[in-house]
Amino acid sequence: MCRWMAWSGQPVLLEELLFKTQHGLVDQSLHSRMGAETTNGDGFGVGWYGAGEGPALYHSIAPAWGDANLRELAAHVESPLFLSHVRATSGTAIQQTNCHPFRHGRWLFVHNGVLAGFHEMRRDLMLAVEPSLFADFVGSTDSEVIFRLALTFGLEEDPVGAIERAIGFVEATAQRHGIENVVQASMGLSDGVRLWAFRYSTAGQSRTLFASADADSLRRLHPENPRLQRLRGEDRLVVSEPFADLPGAWNEIPEASVLIVQPGEDEMRPFRPHFEAAKTNGAQALA
Amino acid sequence: MCRWMAWSGQPVLLEELLFKTQHGLVDQSLHSRMGAETTNGDGFGVGWYGAGEGPALYHSIAPAWGDANLRELAAHVESPLFLSHVRATSGTAIQQTNCHPFRHGRWLFVHNGVLAGFHEMRRDLMLAVEPSLFADFVGSTDSEVIFRLALTFGLEEDPVGAIERAIGFVEATAQRHGIENVVQASMGLSDGVRLWAFRYSTAGQSRTLFASADADSLRRLHPENPRLQRLRGEDRLVVSEPFADLPGAWNEIPEASVLIVQPGEDEMRPFRPHFEAAKTNGAQALA
Amino acid sequence: MCRWMAWSGQPVLLEELLFKTQHGLVDQSLHSRMGAETTNGDGFGVGWYGAGEGPALYHSIAPAWGDANLRELAAHVESPLFLSHVRATSGTAIQQTNCHPFRHGRWLFVHNGVLAGFHEMRRDLMLAVEPSLFADFVGSTDSEVIFRLALTFGLEEDPVGAIERAIGFVEATAQRHGIENVVQASMGLSDGVRLWAFRYSTAGQSRTLFASADADSLRRLHPENPRLQRLRGEDRLVVSEPFADLPGAWNEIPEASVLIVQPGEDEMRPFRPHFEAAKTNGAQALA
Amino acid sequence: MCRWMAWSGQPVLLEELLFKTQHGLVDQSLHSRMGAETTNGDGFGVGWYGAGEGPALYHSIAPAWGDANLRELAAHVESPLFLSHVRATSGTAIQQTNCHPFRHGRWLFVHNGVLAGFHEMRRDLMLAVEPSLFADFVGSTDSEVIFRLALTFGLEEDPVGAIERAIGFVEATAQRHGIENVVQASMGLSDGVRLWAFRYSTAGQSRTLFASADADSLRRLHPENPRLQRLRGEDRLVVSEPFADLPGAWNEIPEASVLIVQPGEDEMRPFRPHFEAAKTNGAQALA
């Protein structure tokens, strides 16, 4: 159920990370090794920060491996910060409005995973979304519901807290419905400056998520690799599964954690979903 | 904003009415004369009753005039009862899940028109849908909301009454939001036996809707027309705008009326939307 | 590089063989076991004989496993003879005109395999096609070239001979270009009455191809299987790889052979490509 | 049959000319005023020079007016030189490989018009293409054939002469086939530095083609128009039909002429197709 990647660092052509890297994201659309499925052919998306106002989106329902427009774009669009996603649907329609990233203003969001029992909870979850945000629903995925819940719970002011409340709310709702192990998620989020990478599941058995080691170490570890020699200080790559088999190149993001990639020192924090009905907008939905 | 047609009668190849008739539905996708737009190129759909369980759907986002699969299907699928629709979006996404007809069990529904202020009312309207039907939402159109409201209000037992209540509920909701002239609609509905054709708008200025004259008269009126000579007693065609300029061939369905095409005598009734909060499931949404 | 199946027998809904059979063709689009690739997600096609004039085609570039229209069609179209194909491109564009089956009049043709060095030979092969057939080229595949060569070499009068001459011509052309092991092919062909299934490769190492055992044996072998109990005398299924693990259910079509499924006794013949320049239309291209 | 535009000048976001200008190219896809058809909904393409190696292409079979990806790209891609095209097919398939611009190395080519009797001449024209270029054919349009003929006849060394020879060859071929008034064309060509705009038809009644007046005049003529006030010295726009009704803003390119937009003074030349069999590679095809 999906693979994603995010880049933050020096501007690169998208193809560097989508196509040219060994076992890059497009290769993972056809041959995922660590995903729930080997094939992620039910849609592709990339969102990037660059020219023009706010982030740009490209969403396609053609499998990433065979999309001629994607190959063109990737070879001609350069960006210092982008998120990309290949989709394996768990049943919802294959359409552009169900492709990640989802966008709100300057914000981009991707999700790999699934909400168990989503069909059953869909109404309750959607009702908890701030009414003024409700009409913005474009697709029918559980991922979009998580994103709009997080926006409802203050994403733009407190990104980590809002995602914790959104996931907490989902868990509380699942409990009322008698649904177990409801959340399975790795999630990426950006505002164009910082990049958040979340790893969490209710059962404590989350999908894999990795961040690249720091550029200096990588250059020293693999002096023979010209691609790695071009890395600079703040370059960081986050991936559902490692692109290449380079010892020492990847650090696993721990269970129930969030990595914040930002100017200066990056930060790793525990991620602790919680939900207190009385304090949130969504409370009314539980009343 | 859309054109549609429905056929009930002897089994015919779909192409007879989609392609081969002068100014048939596919021609209307490119050159509508009476529609709000001349081009209806934002999606196509046909639902037909025939082999297999329940009605079949074909939905396409390619413009009808250029869709090779549609041409093939139309030339090779035969049906005694089908509804077909060409779409001109008023802003919602162009995707298969927004194409008409919508289906529920044996029921098919098409809509030409628009709900004014839909964006604003979307949440209130969706909340009024029976919770067990809520998770079935596939797309983002106002048309699908009308259909699921009608299902909520008893479509399967009392089709005309349920549509009246659904439209009445929309009008009541619009009133609360200060939206005027909310409904503009011609609608088609079928359960595989009967066919309902509704014409209604809040302002009393509805889009055109026509039914073909009875087969006997048509044969007598136009003895030179081989296509009309093949018509049989119960054959009936309902169209947003007439297919050909044949004097006497088309009867306009009056404002605020519903035509019921059925075995035996067809029936024309007034269509009177109304909504009484206390008596319906949707009441809770207004509380 | 592609998987295909063909059915000849009692009329069945397409879904019986595309979706409902264990490891049916749509499952093979995602999880092929014997193909050169496990994923065949670069296009789908089915051609069937039924209502209307000549065979119908449905071609889609959506992966078969996720195509909502295909699921609908398969559940509502019934046919006594159809061929279906899932594609894994070896580089040519993913577009409907490159999807199989190809059609000419009453004839349908599917191909699994590849012509080595096709890019290099493309002009020579296309030039050998009868000039009056040349303008009919719709796509850019090697498979379509084989089909139009066979039409040039008399397919409609002598199907096996024409395919032998077409493949022979390809091998002769490859020889001039210094290309080895040029043909890798399993091919299906039908005129709506008979069904031909060819297995051949220049190197004598052809892709797998199987035909179902006769209906009587199948019913006796598997009295517990309700699907098999419905089989009748002349029912025959040809598949790139077996649908289910039923001992005794499948007979491999031998290397360099053609199976002819027809009213009465079916027939297996050797398949011997050959090309004699002097006797064919295509000769001019070699001069 | 198609509309196109080209920009050469200061870098602009594509949307400035595709979407934001009154009656820009996307509006022309739905409401062309001077084209052979009002609707150009059978495919869209843009080719631009910018980041990465060589020009980029985006081809879509969704109508331009409703393509969400196009709207995104246009709002986020900036280029100093691009060509864009909306298609109304005269019968060939609606597929990305039939969308303009066509590309070869650094060269982009667009065509509005049609070759009369193309189906009949297709083989002869394709055979005249240099064998090493033959395998590059991706689609089935007459436009691509013109482009590959021009490449055969020396486009990269002598662009105007090569197009003259290609068109001349088409006219000579048509004469042998008894086809009259074969060429109807406005064509755009670029190598990333210069931009050529051709207007020609065999009958001397070519489709319209316009170039924007020089930036100084435009600013003086329309001091009230902020968009025009941003124009700089070398900015030049070429369009099938004017974008806005601004008196003095557009100069018609004369019948049988080519405008060369280039650094320094632009140039207008007569365009005189001719074909002398003995001097060209294509000669063999006429023998």
Image (spheres, coloured by chain):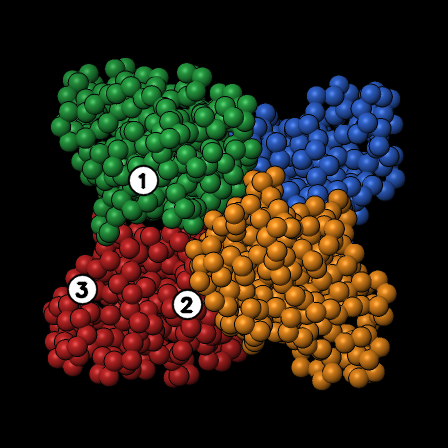
Chain colours: A red, B blue, C orange, D green
Residue C62 image offset from top left, x and y in percent: 53, 57
Q: Give the residue type that dot 3 points to.
A: Gly
Is B164 in front, or is C278?
C278
Quadrant assignment, res C218: bottom right
On the image, numbered disc 3 is attached to which residue? A9
Residue C96 image offset from top left, x and y in percent: 54, 51
As measured in the structure, the alpha-carbon distance from the residue carrying label 2 to the one carrying label 1 is 31 Å
Q: Chain of mark 1?
A: D
Q: Earlier in the sequence, mark 3 or mark 2?
A: 3
Mark 1 Cα within 10 Å, few/some/many (few <14, many 20+)? many
Q: Chain of mark 3?
A: A
As measured in the structure, the alpha-carbon distance from the residue carrying label 3 to the one carrying label 2 is 24 Å
Residue A249 image offset from top left, x and y in percent: 22, 79
Check disc 2 and report its element: helix, strand or loop. Answer: helix
As measured in the structure, the alpha-carbon distance from the residue carrying label 3 to the one carrying label 1 is 33 Å
Is B105 in front, or is A69?
A69
Q: Give the residue type that dot 1 points to.
A: Leu
Mark 3 Cα within 10 Å, few/some/many (few <14, many 20+)? some
Residue lying at 87% horizontally and 27% vertically, measured from the top left:
B216
Is C246 in front, or is D221?
C246
Number of numbered tags placed on the structure image: 3
Q: Chain of mark 2?
A: A
Taking the image as shown, residue A70 lies to the left or right of residue C46, namely left
On the image, numbered disc 2 is attached to which residue? A29
Residue lying at 82% horizontally and 21% vertically, measured from the top left:
B224
Give the foreground label among 2 and 1.
Answer: 1
On the image, numbered disc 1 is attached to which residue? D108
Which of the image's four quarters has the N terminus of chain B?
top right
Residue lying at 40% horizontally and 36% vertically, measured from the top left:
D282
